[in-house]
Image (cartoon, rainbow, N blue to C red):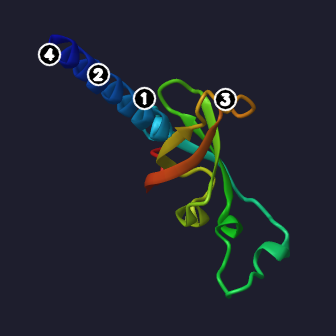
Amino acid sequence: MAAVSRILKSLIFIIVIVGVLWILMANYSVIFSKTVNGEVLNVERVELPVALIARSGGELNEKVFSFAISIKDTKTGEIFAATSEDRQWAIVQTGQCAEAVYLPYPPWELKKRGTYFGARLVRLSECPK
């Protein structure tokens, strides 16, 4: 009976560890996101071929609303760059101040490791002079 109890406890422990690792891997970008406050240096719409717009079913492809964003952090002076498919970036102008959440690529994506995607605009304001 004691052996069955040990095996059951070990099995539950392994299931919990696997569950925690799965949650970390599935939500890595959100867990390790970086909030950047600073001046918007550049926002550019990424021009894609027109073929992406025309699709069967009449739905518009989200890639049409891709933007490349760079913000200079006021605390560190570091410039953060990312891409985003968030339509809010369409109204952002160079020189405005923004708070954005940058989502990093996970380290197991070796070619993109250390870079950001999915910059989410949280707040937009005029920079103080």
Placement of 107 over or under 52, stated as above or below: above
Dot 2 or dot 3, earlier in sequence = 2
- Identify residue type, mark 1: Leu
Please give the label number shown on residue 113. Answer: 3
**Residue receiving disc 4:** 1
Q: CA distance from mark 1 to mark 3?
A: 19 Å
Q: CA distance from mark 1 to mark 4?
A: 30 Å
| Nearest-to-viewer mark from 4 and 2 | 4
**Residue receiving disc 2:** 13
How many C-alpha atoms fall within 10 Å of the one at disc 1: few (<14), some, or many (≥20)? Answer: few
What secondary structure is found at the residue carrying circle 4?
Answer: loop
| Nearest-to-viewer mark from 1 and 2 | 2
Decide if residue 48 is in sight here: yes
**Residue receiving disc 1:** 21
Q: CA distance from mark 3 to mark 4?
A: 49 Å
- Identify residue type, mark 4: Met
Q: Could you tell me which residue is drawn at 53 percent across and 41 percent down?
A: 103
Q: Could you tell me which residue is drawn at 31 percent across and 28 percent down?
A: 16
- Where residue 26 sits: x, y (%)? 47, 40
Dot 4 or dot 2, earlier in sequence = 4
| Nearest-to-viewer mark from 1 and 3 | 1
| Nearest-to-viewer mark from 2 and 3 | 2
Q: CA distance from mark 2 to mark 3?
A: 31 Å
Q: CA distance from mark 4 to mark 2?
A: 18 Å
Dot 1 or dot 2, earlier in sequence = 2
Residue with the most extreme left position: 1
- Identify residue type, mark 3: Arg
Decide if residue 37 is in sight here: no
Dot 3 or dot 4, earlier in sequence = 4
